[in-house]
Structures are given as C-alpha cells and as structure tokens.
Image: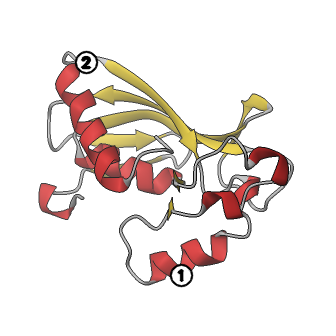
Amino acid sequence: MQFLSGKELTQAIKLIVNCLRPGGKAYLTTTSIYCPWLEDYLPTYNQRVTNGETWAGEIKNFTDYAPEEAKAYIPDFFHALTKEKLQSILVCNHFTIEKIYYYDLYAPYIHIVHPASFTNQAVLVSDMILADKEPYSLTHSKQLSSFMPMRPKEECI
C-alpha cells in the first residue's frame, strides 16, 4: 500500500471490497508516517494535514529521507499513512475493522497504541479488517475502546 498513490489506494480498496465474499477478511500492512526514516518529513506531513491536503503522506522525494545504504533500492514515491487515515479509508468503503494498530517491525508482537517518538523501531500500521456490506454498521477499535458510526458516503474520499 505504501507504493500506491491516494487515488490508486482508493481503487485498490474498492477492488478488495468487490473481490471479498460477504464476511470475508482482508489483512493489510503498510508503513506508517512514524517510520524512523520519515522523522524529518513529519513537520512537512503535519503542515500538509493542517493545509487540508487529502493525501498528506504522499512523498515524491522519498530517497531524500532514506539512509544512504537504502537509496539504491527504494523508489522516489512513497505513501506513509496513519492508523486514523487508513481506518477512515476502510470505513468509507464499508469495512468493519477488527483490529488496527501500530507495531514494531523488529518485535511485531508488541502493539503500540500511539508512537510517542521516533526510536530505532520501524513502526508500521497493521490492519485486520472484515468486509461488511452493511453501509451503516459500527466499527470497533479495541485500542480506542470506543464505537464509531461509519461516515456517510459523501464524506469519503
């Protein structure tokens, strides 16, 4: 997902919805904005969010943020997401989220509710989602321990 533009990501999620049987599950994982490589990009990301940009995590010069040893094998385009942004996209496309959390790449069994700072951990967003064809079902996030109604379709991307 981190190599898809916002438009491509939306199309991919819609394709997943169309391919799943009712009650089918999709398991997704992607790199979050809290990846240590993106520490220097975070102020730009926050400004883009403040400016109302829909896809603030789209980075067209990703190699500028990568360590020297990685620059030879990574693309210039990269799309980092937050848990909240990915949840919004999924809910708008009629998914019920069973679990959504950040985890440490080197210790995936450690779930991080909200990364407080950048460390040596490569924190990723990992999602387990359940397709739900009912457009106004409830979504439950165990990490937030709250129920949220799905957004009306006109608020979706």
The three-letter amino acid code for the residue at tag 2 is Gly
Under tag 2, what secondary structure? loop
> Label 1 belongs to which residue?
47
Q: Residue at point 53% right, 81% down?
A: 47
Q: CA distance from mark 2 to mark 1?
A: 39 Å
How packed is label 2: few (under 14 Cα within 10 Å), some, or many (20 or more)?
few
Q: Quadrant of residue 23?
A: top left
Residue 66 marker = none
Who's the residue at 51% across and 45% down the image?
A: 2
The quarter of the picture where the C terminus appears is: bottom left
Q: Report x, y in % for residue 128.
A: 46, 29
Question: Which residue does the numbered mark 2 point to in the structure image?
Answer: 23
Q: Residue furthest front?
A: 72
- Could you tell whether 37 is left or right of 143 in the image? right
- Residue 38: quadrant of the picture: bottom right
Q: Which numbered mark, 2 or 1, is in the foreground of this view? A: 1
